[in-house]
Amino acid sequence: METIDIAEAVAKYKANTDEVGRRRRDAEEVIGRYGEVFSPEKLEQLTAEDFRAFLLIENNKHWNYISRHVGFLTADMPKLGQSLRVLVDEDRDLVERLNLVVPNGAGLHVRGLGRAICTPILLVVYPDSYGVYNQTTELGMKACGLHPHLTNESFGERYKQINARLTETAREYGLTLFELDHIWWGILQGAERPNGDGEDEEPVGEGLLFPAEAALEQFMIRNWQHLSLADEYDLYTEDGDLGVQFNTGVGRIDILARHKQTGHWLVIELKKGRHSDQVVGQLLRYMGWIRCNKAEAGEEVRGLVIVAEADASLRYAVVPVPQVEVMLYKVNFSLHPAAG
């Protein structure tokens, strides 16, 4: 990918005075509201409703996909509260607290509480000190040649280096860290073609409708251990974030999984309101990205399309691609009289 000049992206942003004004009003509102909610003094009073509200883009104004993990995050509020108190405790070393909160299955880690949620919380509590580090940040920094070379350090050590680069970049270009987070999104906007949440409905079986792609996706994630796929595959996680709506810079993968034994990759797309040619082409693009950017030597990349009904177009589209499979989902729904 050709290196993008961040100075040009910043100049374009600053030239749009309406956008600058809106971003700054958003920052004032979000930081004013949630800086207090997540402050060390108020965290004891945090409710599940408060936390869920922050995850919604209409409230946080920028982070669209973090709400997809809400079911995991609020299942154990005492543990979540304990993790967040460690996260925002400035009396503790940053690396230490991040390594307690973010790593997979260790310390105080709550499933779904990864870098994409922890770093926005740090930003709203300490807006001059901490930048957001998520997939968009990573891809945007790499596109501009600003991402530091990282090896096998812990997440806390890597974030400390990333944050130093973020704060340095914000100062250099006269931006707040909230605005800088918007710059990365703008840099990727042209290349990324997000799937969207899919408000349209698709016929299922005898006239039943699955309410939305997001609902199907959430059902699969929350019930992963009960699906046949879970016999061989685990959901992919990266710095505590689940591989759901995984940002590749050329679009978002609905669900990303890895084989438990071989480490092979599985790219899952939900065909919802899209033509067969479109969904297969999109899937192959994502598979190519994973092969080039994630898969190690010897690791295969496979694709799976999940759909209510497989039409002839879809069946023929995958025939020449043995690495791609189609599976059907079925929804059963019935009503019964209440017990007397």
Image (cartoon, rainbow, N blue to C red):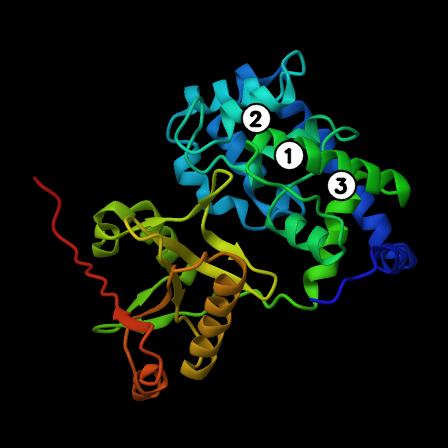
Q: Which of these two is toward me, 149 or 70?
A: 149
Q: Which of these two is toward me, 32 or 227?
A: 227
Identify the mark at residue 189; answer none if there is no mark.
none
Kind of element beneath mark 3: helix
Q: In the shown orientation, is residue 323 left or right of residue 96?
A: left
Mark 2 and mark 1 residues within 8 Å of each other at the beta carbon: yes
**Front label number (2 vs 3):** 2
Residue under pointer 3: 178
Label 1 environment density (alpha carbons within 10 Å; few <14, some 14–19, many ≥20):
many
Q: CA distance from mark 2 to mark 1?
A: 9 Å
**Front label number (1 vs 3):** 1
Q: Position of residue 245 (x, y in %)?
A: 49, 55
Residue under pointer 2: 98
Amino acid at pointer 3: Phe
In the rendered image, is residue 274 in sight? no
Identify the mark at residue 159; answer none if there is no mark.
1
